[in-house]
Amino acid sequence: MRIDDYVAELGKSLCGPPGPKHDLVVEAHDSLADTADALEAEGLARAEAERLAVREFGAITEIVPSYQRELTAAAGRRLGLLLLISLPITVLMWSVIWRFYPTSSVVTWAARPDWYHTASRGLDILQLATGLYGGLSLFALGRGTRWIRRPQLVTRWLGIIVWLMLPVTAGLGLLLSYGAGLQESAQTFLPAVLANLMTAAFWGLQLYGATRCLRITRAA
């Protein structure tokens, strides 16, 4: 098998984030090319040098597991970093907005239901706890891999937790808005509109990352 054919098959066999996957494939190609160049300098024909370099590098089935392990960890690190950054930002952003909203005297916080404070606090704790888990996972899939036997489980649970957390978060958010009669007035309060857009963008990124983590761990 020639180098280009080997690298193409390797790329098809791997599943992971495009950037890290591309880097691994390019690294393999460069290593094979260097070996083939050295063999060609010793007098072998180019085709034979490439076939020998590929044979020395190892079969696809032998190389893929270690490469896939790194790609799985990379996907988990990306999602963990996103959770660590986006969820505390979301909590802080809405905490600031609630200090200035509602602005209408018609809507008063005194009219809030008894459960409102508990639900609001629970939502904050849920998001901060998930962000903390993202930070711990980021460490576990970085320096912590030396102590973890199956890092793919960390990546998989990141995806599962996000898929479990987001519906609960969205439900609590709607409950808090409708429960205090704030949903209609929030549509005209610019900071709340911007915060909703940013929150939705974070949710989209989190769902994308979680789906990719689940797909990669299934492939692994």
Image (cartoon, rainbow, N blue to C red):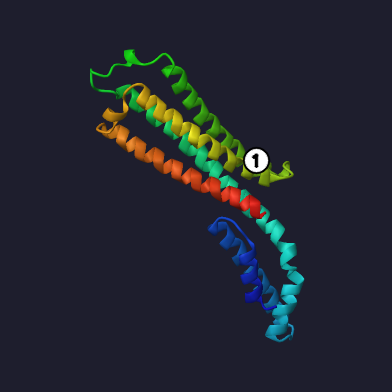
Give me the residue at 34% from left, 21% from top: 180
Give me the residue at 55% from left, 36% from top: 164
Q: Is residue 126 visible?
A: yes
The number of callouts visible is 1
Which sits in the foreground, 94 or 166? Answer: 166
Q: Quadrant of residue 100?
A: top left
Give me the residue at 52% from left, 35% from top: 165
- SS state under label 1: helix
Q: Quadrant of the N terminus?
A: bottom right
Q: Is residue 41 visible?
A: no
For badge 1, the amino acid type reads: Ala
Which sits in the foreground, 31 or 94? Answer: 94
Question: Percent position (x, y) of residue 56?
Answer: 76, 71
Give me the residue at 48% from left, 38% from top: 85
Which sits in the foreground, 120 or 139? Answer: 120
Which sits in the foreground, 45 or 166? Answer: 166
Q: Quadrant of residue 135?
A: top right
Question: Percent position (x, y) of residue 37?
Answer: 67, 78
Question: Percent position (x, y) of residue 122?
Answer: 49, 23
- Which residue corresponds to mark 1? 140
Q: Find the residue positioned furthest to the left.
A: 105
Mark 1 residue crowding within 10 angstroms, few (<14) / some (14–19) / many (20+): many
Question: Percent position (x, y) of residue 151?
Answer: 68, 45
